[in-house]
Image (cartoon, rainbow, N blue to C red):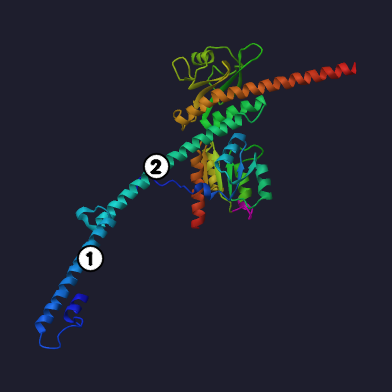
Amino acid sequence: MSDATHMTDPPPVADAPASGDAPVRAERDAMATLRRAQQLVSDAQAAIEEASRVVGQGGGAGPAGGAEARLAVAENERQELAGRLAEVEHQVGRLMTLYVATYQLHATLDPAEVQSTIAEIALNLIGAEQFVLLLIDDEDNGYEVRIMQGEADARWEQTERYTGGDPLVDAALADGGLRFGPTEESPALAVVPLRVQDLTVGALVILKLLDRKPAFVKEDHDLLDLLGAHAASAIFASRAYAKTARKLRTLENLIRLVNKG
Amino acid sequence: MGAELPEEARVNSVKNRKVLVVEDSRLIHKMYEVMLRPTTLLSAFNGHEGLDKLGQSPDVDLIILDINMPKMTGLVEFLERVKTTPAMAKIPVIIVSTEGKEEEVARGLQSGAVAYLRKPFQPEDLLKIINRIESKQTAA
């Protein structure tokens, strides 16, 4: 619109003859208009190129199409990041659970508390409804049933000592390897030998999971591995400490008696 | 829209809050402590202790309540005490239960608990519930 105005109303030319040369003036005006038009075309082309660059490689779709394409890319990236963030949070949760289980196993030197922590891990973190905790008897190296949770299988009921008979449990106690069942001969879902320095100090025998938990999941395997190592050393340390404390008390009593005598 | 964006602000949502945990397991107390860090936690190992803690600190923002509490007639008694005490009535309560306690969970929800969680649970399950409660409170 401004061009039209410019064309119909050209700026005064300082060196124009005073009179009688209208064609020359018209030609000069036309040339000025042409130069102005060329400048406008050049500006428009630059603007189009700039717009194309800004909205992306829209091809023939125009600026709106380019913006949509960029939005779709951004949405895909957002979803991918959301998925990765969820995975990272899950891993953090897993590590947190393992940390807490380890921390709590080693938080006490009382053998009874260590046993109760093992039971809490089985119950609250793994979701075991029925399980048995066997611990070695230092006197005769047999295995005592120290905890029985839930209504265990008939073969475990009324049993204070494990004398063998379950092939899965026997194998785990013998070679210290984690076993998963059930098998035809054994109802155990998992037998976790508690092993420290080549000594199997006990085993956690999981007989049933909660109804809403059809099978062990990846996180449970981590916890079972952790129990195998850390529960064993916690039991070993607490028993050694209890034994030492007992011996110390006996010696102190003896010294007291000797001093009295 | 595909995968929902995880609630990345959820840990922050409990950051400056005070949470009362009524639970008899030391292991689970430790779990909450690590999970909700740096939230201020008040720990109670039975219902009576929980009520004492509430009496001393009525400005608690959230209660996490295990259903299997010793030294308390039942979950309902605890909840009723909380919900009938004006200073505590608005504190949201999350029930934590094990399997086979569905009736008690239902009674707890009727008595004023806002959500429940079944053991064993993943840390993110609890954080999601807390964030949902926070969002509702903010919206209200």
Q: Quadrant of the C terminus of chain A?
A: top right
What residue is rendered at 73% in x and 22% in y? Answer: A245
Drawn side of residue A104 relative to residue A74, left or right: right
Q: Residues in magenta?
A: B83-89
Q: Residue furthest right?
A: A261
Q: Within the image, what quadrant is residue A116 found in?
A: top right
Magenta stretch: dominant SS? loop
What residue is rendered at 60% in x and 44% in y? Answer: B76
Provide the secondary structure element on which disc 1 rests.
helix
- Which three-letter amino acid code belongs to the residue tagged 1? Asp
- What residue did someone put label 1 on? A43
Measure the alpha-carbon separation of dots 1 and 2.
46 Å
Magenta run includes residue A241? no
- Which three-letter amino acid code belongs to the residue tagged 2? Gly
Going from N to C along the chain, the mark reached first, 1 or 2, is 1
Read off the chain for label 1.
Answer: A
- What residue did someone put label 2 on? A83
Drawn side of residue A1 relative to residue A225, left or right: left
Q: Let me know if residue A131 appears in the view.
A: no
